[in-house]
Image (cartoon, rainbow, N blue to C red):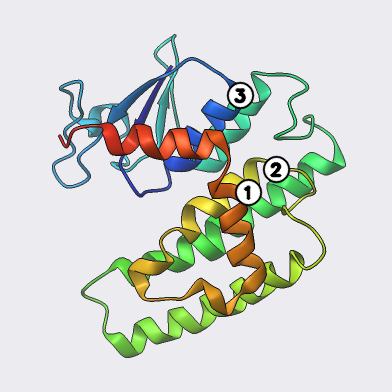
Amino acid sequence: MKLYFAPMTCSLSPHIVLRELGLPFELIRVNNKTKATADSHDFRDINPKGYVAALMLDNGQVLTEGPAIVQYLADQVPGNSLAPANGTWERTRLQELLNFITSEIHGGSAPLFNVDIPEPTKEIFRQKLFKRLDYLNNGLMNKDYLLGDFGLADAYLFTVLKWLPFFNIDIEKWPKLESFMNRIETRPSVRAAIAAEEATQPV
């Protein structure tokens, strides 16, 4: 498998999951501006949407969208602890949470990257995001991870919360989320994924 990624983007989530599961893969960097890849392709030929992550399977099929990629990966290793089995109520709960993260945290953060959006408008997006962070912080009051043990949703939430410093948002306002981030950052898979991405050369 090949994982197409760009540093400090949502592609970190499937990268972490690949390492958690011990699956073999090739890491290929993408230039988000030019769409050039480290293996000399135009990324838009791989993923016409033009954004990471993209997972190319050994048969040439390409899967996009982080929540779909991480669930596919988890299903390649039956019985792993990252995701409940397909068809169970617990898996439905995981899908609910992945959808919340992708729409409300990931999608809710996206406008804050846009330099063309006026500051008063960005403040509206910030306040909405803060309410979602309040919800997550409250949900972690009596547990270390979102759904019990470390799993797919935790890897995804960790990835998008790493963007908060770019927006001058201090996670210390949400102590349980701060502890959550510190806890996940110590995982060997997370440290290895971040180090591997930092070690790649710009395209």
Q: Which mark is residue 95?
A: none
* Quadrant of the rendered image containing residue 164: bottom left
Q: Secondary structure at mark 3?
A: helix
Mark pair 2, 3: CA separation: 12 Å
Asked if disc 2 and disc 3 are in contact, CB closer than 8 Å, the reply is no
Give the Cα separation between the discs numbered 1 and 3: 14 Å
Residue kind at label 3, given as amino acid type: Leu
Question: Which residue is depicted at the point 47% across and 39% down?
Answer: 191
**Badge 1: few (under 14), some or many (20 or more) residues near its Cα, within 10 Å?**
many
Please identify the quarter of the rendering in which residue 76 is found.
top right
Which amino acid type corresponds to the residue marked 1 in the rendered image?
A: Asp
- Viewer-closest of 23 and 53: 23
Task: Check disc 3 and report the residue beneath it.
Answer: 21
Mark 1 and mark 2 in contact (Cβ < 8 Å)?
yes
Q: Earlier in the sequence, mark 2 or mark 3?
A: 3
Q: Secondary structure at mark 2?
A: loop
Please state the horizontal and vertical placement of residue 147, each as a whole percent of the image: 77, 50
At x 74%, y 19%, the residue is: 78
Left or right of 88? Residue 78 is left
Q: What whole-number distance in Å separates the C-alpha atoms at marks 2 and 1? A: 6 Å
Residue annotated with mark 1: 154
* Image coords of residue 51 (percent x, y): 32, 43
Q: Quadrant of the N terminus?
A: top left
Tell me which amino acid carries mark 2: Phe
Residue 19 seen in the current view: yes
Query: Dot 2 surroundings within 10 Å: few (below 14), some, or many (20 or more)?
Result: some
Query: Which residue carries the number 2 mark?
Result: 150
